[in-house]
Image (cartoon, rainbow, N blue to C red):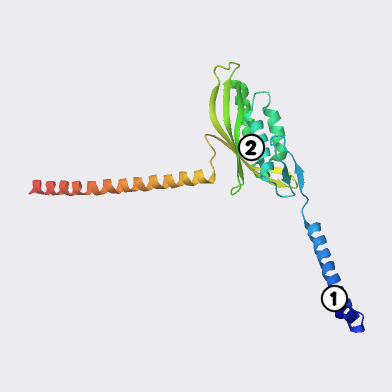
């Protein structure tokens, strides 16, 4: 009752008007802040790649893991299935995706291999088994079985484990292929490369120790040989 009586007075009305203006100012600042955030927020496009069952998001310069994996899977399917008749088709599909730094190198490699495939009538097909995305390095690995056949006989087809490695960036909502590599075996992730480097260093240290041991073993023999020669002269 006292608060109601106070607000009905002149001082009470002034206090109420002050707090009303304060709350209105705070709400206005919040609205301006939200407008600025929404205006500067990148547009996010949600899609469902045909190679995956989950949704993927892509912005102007970034993309979700599923989107990168989907492109890696599609590129491995494209590059891994080569025949004398579709080499030119593969090159045309890769041209819009290649980074300028590797553009000429990749196309020259395709052209050099195309003639060899046509002359030897070699056909390659790829069956992907696993897609791995390594966020720390930005690489996507597609591992599966690669089949190489010469001529038309399926009996002469050879199978091997093969990995296709890609570095994919996003530029203006479109994928940009920064690097391509393929090799026999399992993915060379950062952990695998560190283990290989550690093993190489250990082997190098072991070779150095072996060289030192051989040097220490040969020194006494050299001393004994010199002493024997001196005794003979005497």
Q: Residue 86 location, x and y as percent? A: 68, 26
Bin the neighbour count of mark 2 within 10 Å (Cα to Cα): few under 14, some 14-19, many 20 and up: some
Q: Is 212 displayed left or right of 172 in the figure? A: left
Residue 93 point in image, percent of width and height: 71, 34
Residue 128 spot, x, y in % from top left: 61, 31
Residue lying at the far front of the rendered structure: 1
| Residue at (12, 49) in percent of width and height | 230
Q: Nearer the viewer, residue 173 or 89?
A: 173
The residue under label 2 is 106
Kindly indicate the quadrant of the structure image that contains residue 179: top right
Q: Residue at x 13, y 49 (%)?
A: 227
Name the foreground residue: 24 vs 206. Answer: 24
The quadrant the N terminus occupies is: bottom right
Residue linked to disc 1? 19
Tag 2 or tag 1, which sits nearer the N-term?
Answer: 1
- Crowding around mark 1 (Cα neighbors within 10 Å: few <14, some 14 to 19, many 20+) is few
Disc 2 element: helix
Q: Is residue 144 left or right of residue 30?
A: left
In front: 168, or 207?
A: 168
Quadrant of residue 69 in the image?
Answer: top right
What is the count of numbered marks? 2
Mark 1 vs mark 2, CA separation in Å: 68 Å
Q: Residue furthest left?
A: 234
Image height check: is 215 above or below 126? below
Foreground: disc 1 or disc 2: 1
Instruction: Indicate the position of residue 73 as horizontal and vertical percent values.
Output: 65, 35
């Amino acid at each position: 009752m006292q608060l109601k009586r106070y607000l009905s007075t002149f001082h009470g009305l002034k206090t109420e008007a002050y707090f009303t203006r304060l709350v209105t100012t705070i709400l206005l600042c919040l609205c301006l802040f939200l407008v600025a955030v929404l205006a500067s927020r990148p547009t996010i496009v949600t899609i469902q790649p045909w190679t995956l069952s989950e949704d993927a998001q892509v912005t102007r310069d970034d993309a979700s893991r599923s989107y990168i994996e989907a492109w890696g899977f599609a590129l491995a399917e494209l590059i891994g299935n080569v025949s004398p008749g579709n080499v030119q088709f593969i090159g045309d599909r890769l041209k819009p995706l290649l980074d300028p730094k590797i553009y000429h190198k990749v196309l020259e490699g395709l052209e050099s291999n195309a003639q060899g495939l046509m002359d030897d009538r070699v056909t390659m097909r790829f069956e992907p088994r696993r897609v791995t995305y390594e966020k720390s390095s930005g690489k996507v690995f597609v591992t599966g079985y690669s089949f190489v056949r010469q001529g038309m006989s399926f009996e002469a087809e050879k199978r091997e484990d093969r990995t296709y490695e890609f570095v994919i960036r996003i530029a203006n909502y479109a994928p940009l292929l920064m690097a391509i590599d393929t090799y026999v075996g399992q993915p060379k992730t950062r952990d695998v490369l560190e283990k290989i480097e550690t093993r190489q260093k250990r082997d190098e240290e072991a070779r150095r120790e072996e060289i030192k041991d051989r040097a220490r073993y040969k020194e006494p023999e050299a001393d004994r040989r010199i002493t024997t020669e001196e005794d003979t002269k005497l």
